[in-house]
Each structure stands twice: as structure tokens, then as C-alpha cells.
Image (cartoon, coloured by chain):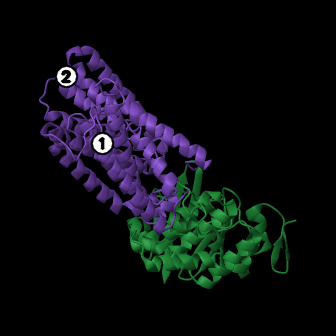
Amino acid sequence: MCSIRIDNLFIKRGNFKLKCEHLFINKGEKVAVLGENGSGKTTFLLAVSGNVENFEGKIELFDKAILSYKEKERAKLISFLPQFGDILFNNTVFDVVLLGRYGQNNGIFRKDDFNKTEKMLSDFDLMKFKNRGFHELSGGEKRRVFLAKTMNQEAVIDILDEPFANMDIKYSLYMLEIMQKMKKTTIASLHDINIAMVFFDRLIVFKKGEIIFDGPKSSITKEVVDEAYEVSCRILDNRFMFF
Amino acid sequence: MKLNNRISFNFLLINLFILCGISIFIGVVEGSVFINLLDMNSTQKSIILLYRLPRTLEALFIGASLGLSGSVLQIVLKNPLADGFTTGVASSAAFGAVLTICFGFSYFFIPISAVIFGVLGIFAVIFATKDTKDYTTLILAGIVLNIIATSFIGFFKYFFEESIGGIVFWLMGGFYNVSYQKVFVVLTVFVIFLSVFFRLSAVLDVFTFDTLTSSSMGINISFVKNITYTLSAVLVAVSVSFSGIIPFVGLIVPHISRAVCGYRSKQNLIVSSLFGGILAVWADILSRTLMPTSEELPIGILTSIIGGLFFFYLLVKRKKAMWYV
């Protein structure tokens, strides 16, 4: 079954143009979106999460136009972690993660929601911050809280824009292992191609608003990576070395 | 000082209700003359029943409405300065009242006109800012509306000098025109709005996330924004139509509430209402008793002083930011 289908997509935002002719994302796929800064990763993720209103072409979510969904219906299908997530007040970490469940329960929080939030906090190693204010945490810790909140939404598809920004390597790997175990459809933009090579199945590489590679990770070549990042890399043990 | 778990919130709530009761009691017995409730003559009885009790209750519910509206407005506009005054609602409602006074309409129309103009003001702000996604612009538009409305009031005050006494009431605020009918209306309005906002409390919580996050969490941002903004503006306009402009309650009370009970909207709406009510009752008590003559001090002076000092006390004691982002 096709979760997300794109046909002849064209988006123009200021001087930036994004093109994508045909693209399907199937259930359970783990897709890494790669490319240099400004290549269109974020615009692509915003579009497939229903956050771009003006575009040409078609974006379908489970065979229905993505913009035809009400926010509440969409929240059950897609949970989106934006690049710069923030919250107004110094809510406790527990409350931030708990609020992730709004899409599932219409704002009436029951025992089940509290239990799932506790479980999510312990899965993400956040129990020690449970009653701390969100704004008292470091950048990487905040990111982890937002990731836990996004997962706590229990949507069918997770779309994550640079989920590991500011996160140290230990917790990045820890998060990746959790995400692998969840076996959900995941689309994430990443900066580290080697993380994509290990933890994701399919790579989509953007360059100047166009897709220059879309396929299983096994078929990516040194030439594609060189073109994408405008550097010269070499391959060592199935990893790309840049310097 | 921040209370997070249920038990301590209930404890806070009980204390606030007790404080509320004590404040009402003092509001009833204290005034230009002290009245012993256990030993009253018939004049004293009628002073209490016809005058002090409804007045104190009106202060309580108006203060609660202002605290409630400020609490919602600061979330909806994502701004620590948002309240009925900085959104321009209070002044445009007062302008509506002043207009009807100046053109000699009967007293029945004054509150109606206040509400209509307050709501028109809010629609003007929503219309003027409909293409912007920036929340600070809304406050800016509100402050401009406030200045325009205040200037118009100034013009009418200058032009129709004879009705100036009536105008001053709308500008400085006060609880001296009371009746049980008014108390009943104010109470009903407050209860309706509290229950509506209470039902929306989870939506308000989700709204405090950045726009992209909150819309993917399942709320329609512009719908929620317009609805809650309009509702809280109506609440402010209704309050102004009963008691004139009472500054500072809507601005300061939500900050006090967040400082003592944390950031859950559900709890904040109740605590803001209670603090707002208590602050207004005390301001009213002091306005009646502070002057050695039987004159009354304008209520706005007292809400500002009491609320402001308490706010400074909290700032110093917490040594923490009151607002993030």
C-alpha cells in the first residue's frame, strides 16, 4: 500500500523551486532525505507533511489529497517534527510529551495517555527530567523531548526534519535504535549520510531543488555523493569518508 | 514554588477559595463605616444587602473575567504583554460607551454599545493583520487601536464637557453602579466563558507550541486563533461595559498564576480567574476605605499598585524568567 504519492510536484517559495515528478513512499519504509544546505530537504518534508499550501501537482496521503484532511485527521496519520520546534512556556518535560497525545485523544487525557507518556519518557531516557522545565534543558535534551513528543502522537508516518540536530552521538544512536524497533514509516532529513547508510532503507538525495538519487541505500555510489555535497569522498568499509 | 502535582494544586485551590471568601467578607463589613454583621440596624442591613454585597460580588466576577481573558489572550497572541488593554478592546469598548453618553442615548444602550465597539475593534485588528503570520503585529495593531480609541475619547471629552462625569467612570473604572441584575449578568457571562475556555484548555496548551508543531499535532491554527481571540475580546468588552476600564488585572494576573501553579492551561484558567477576582475585590475595598474623606479612589490606581507590587515580589523571589522564547 502506498502511504504517500507525489505526481508532478512543483513548489515555488521566493527564489527557491522544488521539483519532484513521481515518488511513492510505501508503508514501513525508512526514508532518509539527504542533500546540502538549501537543497530542498525541508521544503520537501513540509510538503509531504501537509504544511505547504501553494503547490502545483498532486500530493496524496493514503489516496486522498493531503490538503483535504482536517488537522485532526492528519495528526492521526502524520506526526511532524519541524527543524526548529519550540514552546512558549517552561512546561514540564512530562507535560510536553503528554501533549503529543492530543491528536489521539482530543485533549481529554486519561490513564492510558499518562501511562504511554511515562513509557515514552523511559524509552527516551528522559525520566530524570520528567518534572524539569523544558527551557532548563540543553539543546540536545530539548530535541530528545520533542522527538519523544512526536513519537507519542502514535501517527502512522513520522516525518522528522533533522531529528538529531544538537544531539550527541550517544543519544543519536540510542534514538535511531528505538526508531528501528518501532517499524513505522519514517521520513527523516539527515546530515550524516553514514547514519542513513546504517539505519535507513531508502535514500532520496536533493540537489538545487531536484532529486538526483532515489533508491535503496545499496545502490548509491561515490559519484552521487560527490555531486550532492560537492566534495570528493572515498568509500571505506561501506562508509563514506570525506576527509 | 512551582506546583506541579495534583495534590499541591488542590491545596493551592483550597487556599485561594478561602482567601476569596475572606476577601468577600471584608469587602462586605469594611467601608466608609465598619459594620458588625452580628449587630446591625435596618439601615446597616440595607447598606450591606443592597450596596456592599452586590458591589463586592461584581468586583469579584469582573476581576475574574479580566484575569481569565488575559490568560487566554497571552497564549493566543503569544505575547506577555497581551491583555484587554494592549489588544485595544478595552479602549474601543469605552469609546463605544462614551459615544452613547455624548449623544444622549438612554443608559440601557451604554453597555450594548460598549460591547459592539469592543468587538468591532477586535475585528478591525483581525482584518488588518489577516495576511501576517507574526503574532507581535497583532499586539502592535492592538496598541494602535488603543491609541486611536483613547484619542477619540479625549476628543469627545473635550467637545461635550457637560457629560464629563459620566465619561470619567468609563476611563478610570469602578464598581459603584451596582445592582443584583448586573451581578447576575456578569456572573453568567463569566461562567459561560470559563466553561468554554475550560473545554478549550488542551487546545490552548497545544497552541503554545510553534505554529508548525501545533498544526501537526492536530489543531487548526487560524480557526483557534480567531475564535479564542474574539471570545476573550468579547469577555473584556462585556467587563468594560459594566465597570469601565480596569487596567493591569488582565496583564499581571496570568503571570502571577503561571508563577505559582505552572503552565497547564486548565489550572491556569481557574487560578487566573481567582487571582483576578481577589485582586479586584481588594482594590475595591481599598478604594472605598483608603481616603480619609468619604471619596473613592479610582480603582485602576489600586489594581496597578497592588498587582504591580505583588508581581515585583514574585520576580525577585523566583529569580527566573517569567516568559520564554
Name the residue beneath numbered marker 2: B102
Give B309 or A131, whichever is nearer the viewer: B309
Name the residue beneath numbered marker 1: B27
Q: Is residue A233 above or below residue B165?
A: below
Quarter of the image holding residue A225? bottom right
Where residue A156 appears, x then y in whole percent? 50, 78
Give B7 or B235, whichever is nearer the viewer: B7
Q: Secondary structure at mark 1?
A: helix
Where residue A190 appears, x then y in whole percent? 68, 67
Residue at (25, 24) in percent of width and height: B167
Residue at (58, 71) in percent of width and height: A148
How many marks do you count on the picture? 2
Where residue A107 appears, x then y in whole percent? 40, 68
Give B220 or B177, whichever is nearer the viewer: B177
Q: Is residue B186 above or below residue B18?
A: above
Q: Secondary structure at mark 2?
A: helix
Ranked by sequence position, the earlier of labels 2 and 1 is 1
